[in-house]
């Protein structure tokens, strides 16, 4: 069957129905179409990679903020504990610092749970 197609093509060229320039242009069009499809696919992949990178950056920023809040709360609690020890009695400052440390710990734990849930959903798809 392939021989028939080639024979037919050669006969069409010999008859002047198809020119070599026309064949070259058709081959060029096919090659361009293949590369265009490949380029479009690569563009989609790059766009998805950029979106995933932006999502990861946003999550890192949120985690960094929570970590800074925890560090601040722990520092405040340490200072309040030292002051209470120095004064020989706990005071309202220590209670507030402890409450702040507990609250930031809860927020961080919630963040960790949300990240675990997202990861599970991603692996499910």
Image: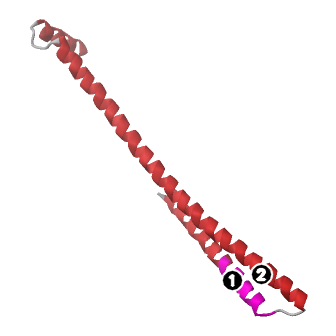
Q: Name the residue under label 2.
A: 77
Cβ atoms under marks 1 and 2 closer than 8 Å = yes
Q: Is mark 1 on a helix, strand or loop?
A: helix
Q: In this view, does 26 lie above or below 35?
A: above
Residue 121 visible in the displayed image: yes
Q: Name the residue under label 1.
A: 100
The segment highlighted magenta reads: 91-104
Residue 116 visible in the displayed image: no
Give the dominant element type of the magenta stretch: helix, strand or loop: helix
| Residue 94 highlighted magenta (yes or no) | yes
Could you classify mark 1 by the number of other residues whose Cα lies within 10 Å: few (under 14), some (14-19), or many (20 or more)? some
Residue at point 62%, 69% (across, down): 65
Q: Is mark 2 on a helix, strand or loop?
A: helix
| Residue 92 highlighted magenta (yes or no) | yes
Left or right: residue 33 versus residue 120 is: left
Residue at point 87%, 93% (across, down): 89
Q: Which of marks 1 and 2 is nearer the N terminus?
A: 2
Rendering coords of residue 5 (x, y %): 20, 15
């Amino acid at each position: 069957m392939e021989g028939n197609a080639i024979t037919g093509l050669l006969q069409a060229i010999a008859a002047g129905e198809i020119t070599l320039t026309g064949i070259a242009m058709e081959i060029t069009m096919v090659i361009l179409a293949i590369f265009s499809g490949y380029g479009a696919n690569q563009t989609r992949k790059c766009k998805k990679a950029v979106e995933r990178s932006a999502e990861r950056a946003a999550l890192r920023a949120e985690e960094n903020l929570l970590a800074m809040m925890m560090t601040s709360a722990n520092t405040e609690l340490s200072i309040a504990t030292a002051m209470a020890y120095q004064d020989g009695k706990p005071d309202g400052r220590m209670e507030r610092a402890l409450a702040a440390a507990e609250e930031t710990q809860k927020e961080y734990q919630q963040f960790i749970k949300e990240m675990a849930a997202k990861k599970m959903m991603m692996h499910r798809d």
